[in-house]
Image: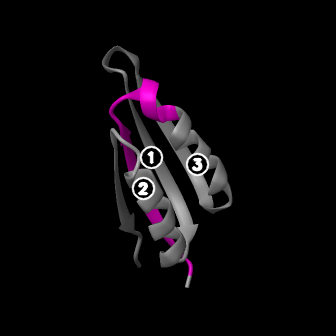
Amino acid sequence: MERYYTIDIIVHNRDDAYDKVNELLHQFAKYIKLRVGYPLEKENMAVIFLIFKANNDKLGSFTGKLGQIKSVKVKSIAITN
């Protein structure tokens, strides 16, 4: 069953990880309903907020792949009624 999730992504080293994160965002683009990103250039960091609509397996695949990228932290929360 598809449902909505919020996903928070913190990229601690933009130089090393940002291209890999963007590649995954493009691979899962059809599930992303909203994307807001904020680069913190002085700190070489970025914060990305997503609204993601998919089943639990797709969510797990996406967040699991993000979590394997060095210097990336990811948290997801199901949006419930």
Q: Which residues are magenta?
A: 2-18
Secondary structure of residue under mark 2? strand
Mark 2 belongs to which amino acid? Ile
Coordinates of residue 25 in the picture (x, y in percent): 58, 48
Q: Quadrant of residue 6?
A: bottom left
Residue at 36% across, 21% down: 44
- The one of 43 and 23 positioned closer to us in this rendering: 23
Write down the residue under mark 1. 49
Mark 1 belongs to which amino acid? Phe
Write down the residue under mark 3. 25
Of tags 1 and 3, which is closer to the observer? 3
Secondary structure of residue under mark 1? strand
Coordinates of residue 65 in the picture (x, y in percent): 46, 57
Mark closest to the chain's N terminus, 2 or 3: 2
Q: Is residue 36 above or below residue 4?
A: above
Write down the residue under mark 2. 7
Mark 1–mark 2 contact, CB under 8 Å?
yes
Residue at 33% across, 33% down: 12
Q: Work out which quarter of the rendered image holds the N terminus and state it.
A: bottom right
Q: Is residue 6 above or below residue 53?
A: above
Mark 1–mark 3 contact, CB under 8 Å?
no
